[in-house]
Amino acid sequence: MNPDSSNAASLHASPVDGLLKDAVGDAIQRGKAGIAESAAGIRDSLAVDLTRLRADIAGMQETVSKFASQAGGEAVRAARNVGQAVASQAGCAASEIAEAGADMAATATQQVRTMASELENIVRRNPVGIVTGALLAGVLIGAFWRSGRRHQV
């Protein structure tokens, strides 16, 4: 091929070549426009889906928050009820123990008074026997005391 002939071919382009170039250019432009429209539609659809997803997540957070609040409230109420029941039982037990102690103290006091009264009556009925018994008790105590001192030395 001759370099002059290729120049001549390019200088003399046919009208069909121009139409073909225009058709290809138009097809490329339509393809670009279609892709841009599809991308815009997908972007809009994605934005709507993302907005819905955010709303769903916010709703789930609210539900979980309400659930946690209610569960916490129930736990507090249950703990309070258990605490009140334990305090009530402890209070009842303490009251019963205090009442029993008071009853025992009253009974002991009454028995001491009764014994003192009986001892007083015995002393009034037999004063000589009491004095003799006290003297005998003193002698016995003294004898034990002296015998213990002798064995120590």
Image (cartoon, helix red, strand yellow):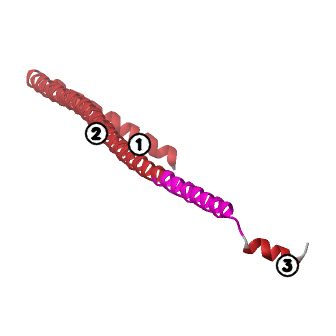
Q: Check disc 3 and report its element: helix, strand or loop.
A: helix
In the picture of the structure, the residue carrying the numbered disc 2 is 73
Q: Marks 3 and 2, how far apart in space?
A: 97 Å
Task: Depth check: give the residue in front, 152 or 70.
Answer: 70
Q: Callout 1: 10 Å neighbours few (<14), some, many (20+)? A: few
Q: Position of residue 87 (x, y in %)?
A: 25, 35
Is 132 left or right of 16, judged from the image as shown? left
Is 145 left or right of 97, judged from the image as shown? right
Q: Does the magenta stretch mainly form a helix, a strand or a loop? A: helix
Q: Check disc 1 and report its element: helix, strand or loop.
A: helix
Residue kind at label 1, given as amino acid type: Arg
Which range of residues does the magenta coloring cover? 13-40
In the picture of the structure, the residue carrying the numbered disc 1 is 146
- Mark 1 or mark 2: name the one nearer the start of the chain: 2
Q: Nearer the viewer, mark 3 or mark 1?
A: 3
Q: Nearer the viewer, mark 3 or mark 2?
A: 3
Residue 56 against residue 106 in the figure, above or below:
below
Disc sitting over residue 56 in the figure? none
Disc sitting over residue 4 in the figure? 3
Residue kind at label 2, given as amino acid type: Gly
Q: Are marks 3 and 2 in contact (CB under 8 Å)?
A: no
Q: Callout 2: 10 Å neighbours few (<14), some, many (20+)? A: few
Residue at 79% x, 75% y is: 8
Q: Marks 1 and 2, how far apart in space?
A: 80 Å
Residue at 84% x, 74% y is: 5
Residue 107 against residue 76 in the figure, above or below:
above
Residue kind at label 3, given as amino acid type: Asp
Q: Nearer the viewer, mark 1 or mark 2?
A: 2
Q: Position of residue 14 (x, y in %)?
A: 70, 65
Q: How many labels sit on residues?
A: 3
Q: Check disc 2 and report its element: helix, strand or loop.
A: helix
Is 58 left or right of 81, judged from the image as shown? right
